[in-house]
Image (cartoon, helix red, strand yellow):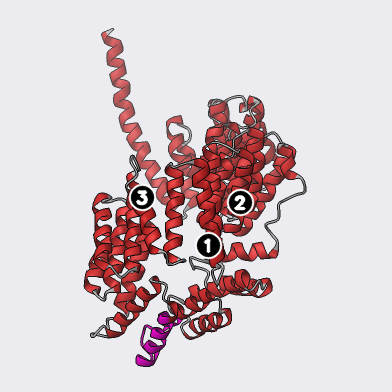
Amino acid sequence: MKGVVLAMIWCLLIQVPTQAQDSQRIGLANEYFAKGDLEKAKVLYEELSRKNRNIPQIHNRYLTVLAQLGDYDQGVSYLQKLIHQFPAVVQYPLDLGIFYRKAGKPDQADQQIIRTLQSIKNQKYQIISAAQYLFNKQETPFALKAYQLGREAEKDPHLYALEMAEIHRRMSQKTEMVNEYLNFANSNPNNINYVKNILQNLLTDEEDLIQLEKLLYEKIQKNPNESLYASLLIWVNLQQQNFYGAFVQARALDKREKGGGTRVLEIGKIALDNNDYKNAIKVFTHVAKNTKTGVNYELAKRFLVKSREELVKNTFPVDLEEIRHLIKDYDEIIVEIGKNERTLEAMRSQALLYAFYLDRRDSAISILQNIVSTPGIKSSLQNQAKLDLGDIYLLNQEHWESTLLYSQVEKAQKDQPLGYEAKLRNAKLSYFKGDFELAQGHLDILKLATSREISNNAMALSLLIQDNTVFDTTDLAMQAYADVELTLFQNRRQEALLKLNHLLESYPGHSLTDEILWLQSNIYLELGNFDKALELLNDVVTGYQYDILSDDAYFLMGTIYEDQLQNAQKAMEIYQDFLTKFPGSIYSAEARKRFRSLRGDFDEGPPNLQENFN
């Protein structure tokens, strides 16, 4: 036993200097390789390759040297020896195929790689290793082939979907990539949100979404009972802001799954939030008509009137008779459904219509006070009603009452969106009164608000104050402009126009000029004088093309031609030109959607497609 131990120690003592020598020789060979002295490197690598322990350290460089020197026979011989010695290592037979390609033998290369993949197709780990290795070696089609063979061997059509999608992405094969992501989503319903997130990041061009929409239509026609594709098509339409298209699919899917209108109702809410009032009306009308009772019915009824309200308020000049009809419709909802959280929202809408359109402020205050004192009311709704009361007191020029209510809400909803909204209203109140320092104090805090909308509004008002007071230490022009904004808030439009004209005469060439023109154009728009509004907006676009309001003005011109003057051709021209002039504008997505809608892209889809879900 003692002799055996001594022999083992002796062997180890012999191997240590040998391994050290090999390491030195490997280092020297690598130096020759790096310097381009390939013949010397080849001699050393060839000697080192006779010991199997050296193979992992020299293999890739040795093959590179042989290929560059054109010594293909030696390379093939070397690889065949390794394949014989290490039959379980899939890298070596793949390297032989790759080496054949470098030797100018593509047919032998393809045959060798395919033969190797066929031999391991039932071994999942080996298939994954082979595919990854081939991908790294730029043998991308064969990496795909590896996964395809593995998928066929396992008889699982969803296997390796993500891996294959990634390869198609690297090859810029978008259709194949999307098909594999859809395949992955089809394998498990829980994967759909992951796929949506991936596609949202990868399909950034408008044309990409159009192609995805076409692909989904094709899959729906071939698989009419598969809900996945309809769900994704709804999502694609929402990405394109094609709310009617989303509604068509959601309606069909809801009918098939007996969803009670929930999915359709969500589409309506999104359309309403994105100011697509006409399609929101279609959606809520459908839900109200087809549900008859229950929460979705009550929500649909309220949102239907709310959508009609927004449409009336944005059709100029506002028809006061329509406002009275809306108040009556809210009354009918309250009577039909009774007093609950949803009808309290209807009452709140009534109050604001009374105050801001019919000048019946006492009626508005009475309704809002009724809401605030309702037992068990949610604190958010109660505080929202308090904010509304503050606004109405501001209409009455009772500034102290307004700031008191705003401050109550700010304290009650601290670090909540409603609390930030209350602080923003206090900032605006300080701004209206010309106390710009106090306003900036509020706005500096609000710039960090978690709500993007509130943060952006705070930033915009802060910049307005800064940009127009920095060269005017008296602040007189800015104070006069802020007073005009208060006058407008109080619905005294004609008086506001007179004040704005006086401002232009008193401060010619002031930095506020573009803001003054912008306000004037909006007032004329609300008064129904569209020609004058367009003239002033054009002055902003042409005279202040590099200022912040230029894209706002140009986009508004397009909407006036489309919504107010019904001149689709002129609107399309403006939207198309807008996308060229202002590609980074926040209105770009809306301009693109409106252009496509006017062009007729948002039709209901292939004939009778929705019937496939019935």
Is residue 307 or residue 65 the one in the foreground? 307
Instruction: Tell me: residue 32, above or below residue 143.
Output: below
Distance between the alpha carbons at the discs numbered 1 and 2 = 32 Å
Instruction: Tell me: residue 466, above or below residue 141.
Output: below
Tell me the amino acid under the disc marked 3. Answer: Asn
Q: Earlier in the sequence, mark 3 or mark 1?
A: 1
Instruction: Tell me: residue 504, above or below residue 280.
Output: below
The mark found on residue 549 in the picture is none
Tell me the amino acid under the disc marked 1. Answer: Ile
Is 513 part of what is drawn in magenta? yes
Q: Secondary structure at mark 1?
A: helix
Residue 471 x, y percent position in the rendering: 27, 85
Proximity of marks 3 and 2: CB atoms separated by less than 8 Å: no
Residue 443 x, y percent position in the rendering: 28, 65
Is residue 315 or residue 242 the one in the foreground? 315
Is residue 249 or residue 319 the one in the foreground? 319
User: So how many labels did they put on this image?
Assistant: 3
Distance between the alpha carbons at the discs numbered 3 and 1 = 21 Å
- For residue 229, say whether it is visible: no
Tell me which corner region of the image, top left, top right, bottom left or bottom right, holds residue 402: bottom left
Q: Secondary structure at mark 3?
A: helix
- Magenta residues, as a range? 495-517
Residue tagged by mark 1? Answer: 323
Residue tagged by mark 3? Answer: 370
Residue tagged by mark 2? Answer: 237
